[in-house]
Image (cartoon, grey):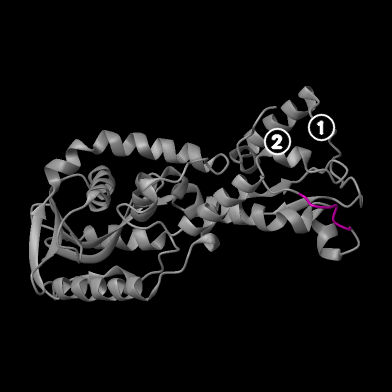
Amino acid sequence: MVAYSIDALFNRTGRGDLLARLRSEKIVRILEPQCGICSNNCNIRLGSCGILQLYAYNGSNGMWGILGFDVLLSQKPACTDSFTCCVGCIGVYFISNIIAKAFVMSRFYSFTKTSFVRGMQCPKLVYLDKYCSKLRTPPDRDTLLRFRKGREFEQKFKDMFPNAVDVKKHCSIRSIKYVEFTTNALAAEGRVELFEAGVLHGDILVLTDVLRKNDDGSYDIFEVKHSEKINSAIAWDVAVQYYVCKNALGNINSFNVVNRCGEGEFLVTDMTAEAEEKLQLVHENLNAFREILQGFEPEVPMGPQCDEPYVCDFKRYCMAKADTQCSM
């Protein structure tokens, strides 16, 4: 059986090729443009993606499995409901999955530094973090306290830059205008200091804690961490930010990690050389993560990565899934 990428559904040319292949291979009997049960037209308007035709096979989920929608139908939905009819007989069962993936793909970016770092901890996290965020275990009290202390420490360091502009106070991160605001601010003559500058390279968006453009056009970047040492997650955090900033901005003078030293003191470590060495690894891993997002949830056995360097937000989900599989 052939597995098709969801990309084919949202690309006009790819969609035509996909349907042509399905017809020629006779994998399923396609009824177009009507639903196999209620005979209503099956289409959903997805903004800039245009109209995506959904083809049903007499209420069967066989075709949808081939297309990559890994949601199983427990029963045939009734077509008497007006909402169900407007999207075809598969409507109420698949609409949330389709719209979720369509929304994700409609963003102007696919990855952030956080999603990349999570993927380096476990490749399964890339998929779960993107498509299954509701399965995440909410942070406990201790974790929330750690987050608060981290924000306070970061703000204390930012207070050393009284003339900096906080981009988050001017734009929504959900809009490409966030990146445009950053670009326009950095285009000004002379020294510029920004908090949470949005830097985009391809489909990767990073927000830098503190970004300073110097008079000579070079950049100094500071990533603030409340921890006292640099672990693997912080190292990859710096690496992916450096990768994006170097490609998008060019002349990076230094990329620094600001750790806690004692009671509220700052320890600044220049990580530029280490980040430079990881450029190719970042590129290769991003390509691997893109492949993961085009397929099904990866099968990754539980192991040390569930707890190191941080306890995974999806650990309970994976434990429950493993228990279910063992009992079958």
Q: Nearer the viewer, residue 207 or 1?
A: 1
In the image, taking residue 44 as reference, residue 257 lies left or right, namely: left
In the image, taking residue 82 as reference, residue 123 lies left or right, namely: left
The residue positioned 51% from the left and 60% from the top of the image is 133
Residue 318 location in percent, x, y? 51, 52
The residue positioned 8% from the left and 59% from the top of the image is 268
State the image quarter where residue 170 is shown: bottom left
- The residues tagged by marks 1 and 2 sit, at their Cα atoms, a distance apart of 9 Å
Identity, as a three-letter code, of the amino acid under mark 1: Val
Taking the magenta stretch, the answer to whether it contains residue 97 is no
Q: Is residue 209 above or below residue 62?
A: below
Viewport quadrant of the N terminus: top right
Q: Secondary structure at mark 1?
A: loop
Specify the segment rendered in magenta.
73-78
The residue positioned 11% from the left and 61% from the top of the image is 190
Identity, as a three-letter code, of the amino acid under mark 2: Ile
